[in-house]
Image (cartoon, helix red, strand yellow):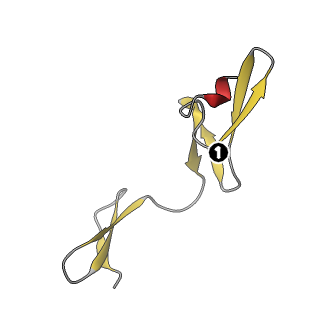
Amino acid sequence: DECLDPGACSQICINEKGTFKCECHSGYARDPMDRTRCKATEGHPSLLFARRFDIRKISLDHNEMVAIV
């Protein structure tokens, strides 16, 4: 069972006889460069991080940082 390997698929692993296939949850699609990985179909990637007195969000696809709290 290839799906027992935690890195087989990034979201849903379907075991088939002698092989496996990967599927993605709603709002995600398989990455055309790596069919075992899923990528968000909408939205922009960002990183949330905490500093001493606030929480901020920085956009990973363009140069923007905002305070959340």
Q: Position of residue 13 (x, y in %)?
A: 69, 35
Which SS class for mark 1? strand
Q: Residue at x 68, y 45 (%)?
A: 24
Relative side of 8 to 12, left or right: left
Residue 43 lies, with reference to residue 38, above or below; the image says below
Q: Residue at x 66, y 23 (%)?
A: 2
Furthest residue toward top: 18
Residue 1 lies, with reference to residue 6, above or below; the image says above
Residue 9 lies, with reference to residue 47, above or below; the image says above
Furthest residue toward left: 52
Relative side of 13 to 55, left or right: right
Q: Position of residue 37 (x, y in %)?
A: 56, 37
Q: Position of residue 41 (x, y in %)?
A: 60, 53
Q: Residue at x 56, y 34 (%)?
A: 6
In the picture of the structure, the residue carrying the numbered disc 1 is: 29
Relative side of 69 to 35, left or right: left
Q: Residue at x 44, y 58 (%)?
A: 45
Q: Residues within 10 Å of mark 1 (few under 14, many from 20)?
A: some
Which quarter of the figure has residue 54?
bottom left
